[in-house]
Amino acid sequence: MISPAQIKILKHSKNRGKFLIKPLSPGFGITLGNSLRRVLISDLEGYAIYYIMINGVKHEFSYIDGVIENLNEIILNVKQIRFKLKSKIYTKIPEHFTIFLNQKKSQITAGDLCGSITCFEVLNPNFLILNKELDTNLKLTLGIKKGVGYVPVEKQKNKIGKIPIDTIFSPIINVRLKVETCEVNEVNEGNNLYSYDSLIIDIRTDGSITPKNALKKASSILIQHFTLFFNGKKTELKIPIKYTAYKKRLKYFYMQKLLNCLKFAKMKTWADLVKFKKMKLKNLGLYSESQTHTDTDYGGGDYGLDLSKYQFNIYKKKNRIKSFREKMRKIVKLRNLIKRRKMNKRNETPK
């Protein structure tokens, strides 16, 4: 396997760019080129018209008085108008734009929309929309929004009166690929020549994005998707919630069994556990034994330890509580004994 050593820009302008990527391992020219082409065409964002309204028109097969084209032809023309947001200052874009076409012009082009659509730049102002009579006035309402790829009419939900249109959000007009062979001189292999792939990508955009930035965005989208499988670290698979809950219940069951075994063997403290040379208890399985092994290793101990060399009282706190309770019992017994004696003396005295 060989990774590409260089990406050379053969040609670059506002609307068109040509890039050479080489060397690539045999077969990777088509693999890499098809992936980039698909992402470029279908996954880049852009602005486009998604519905149209004209006063007095109810459906897309209507004819408009004073206009040569029918509404269906006008929609086909409007669909090809390209927009670019003028500045990032426009955080909130209006839902629709109303344009009054009352100019004394026989031809209406995309540039005639610029006066009403202030936050957008029309990239093809000379594109013809319709031909009309000089005295014909039109009120045109357009809905413009941001989207990805291509959205057909069937997937758009619009209110009554709005005529939805097929929307092309992608700023990419065309992407062409060409795979050629290139020879690489391997110094470590005795200066032998090996044939590899070289990929030429020709990108045409509408001008809202440069071909170089479009190629960068497409590459970053691919990288983001591939990091789901590998991100340079050990990937962790998501375990279903039901399975994790089952594992927790199973672990709780084993720990309860372990505690019962230790209680049966009269092991109440950590010292009692580490004194044993071997963990052979009744009803103690392999899982419970492994759990106790890990716990003792974590605590810094092992089985069969001699605790006599450590001069400390393990049961100090426990013995203190026991002695306090015994003293209290003796006091209560003594008090009860004194009460009984007093009662007996009272009963013995004559009335």
Image (spheres, grey):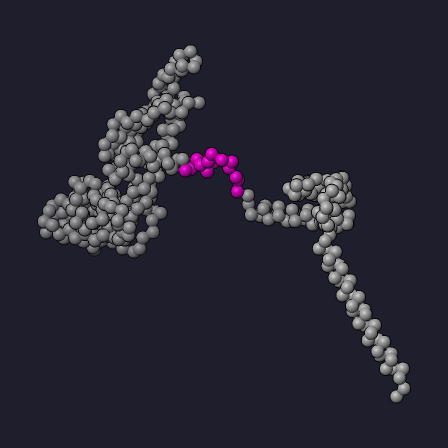
Q: Quadrant of the N terminus?
A: top left
Residue at horizontal 75 percent and vertical 62 percent from the top = 325
Q: Quadrant of residue 44?
A: top left
Question: Looking at the image, can residue 162 be seen?
Answer: no
Is residue 123 one of those drawn in magenta? Answer: no
Is residue 236 one of those drawn in magenta? Answer: yes
Q: Quadrant of the C terminus?
A: bottom right
- Return the x and y of residue 153 as percentages of the image width and height: 32, 46
Query: Which sits in the foreground, 108 or 268?
Result: 268
Query: Which sits in the foreground, 167 or 82?
Result: 82
Q: Quadrant of residue 84?
A: top left
Q: Is residue 109 left or right of residue 222?
A: left
Residue most extreme to the bottom: 351
- Return the x and y of residue 219 as percentages of the image width and height: 36, 34
In the image, residue 26 above or below residue 39: above
In the image, residue 38 above or below residue 87: above
Query: Which sits in the foreground, 212 or 268?
Result: 268
Question: Looking at the image, can residue 244 be seen?
Answer: yes
- Return the x and y of residue 337 as percentages of the image width and height: 83, 72
- Return the x and y of residue 343 as percentages of the image width and height: 84, 79
Residue at horizontal 29 percent and vertical 56 percent from the top = 160
Residue at horizontal 59 percent and vertical 48 percent from the top = 245
Residue at horizontal 46 percent and vertical 38 percent from the top = 228
Residue span colored magenta: 224-238
Q: Is residue 229 left or right of residue 155?
A: right
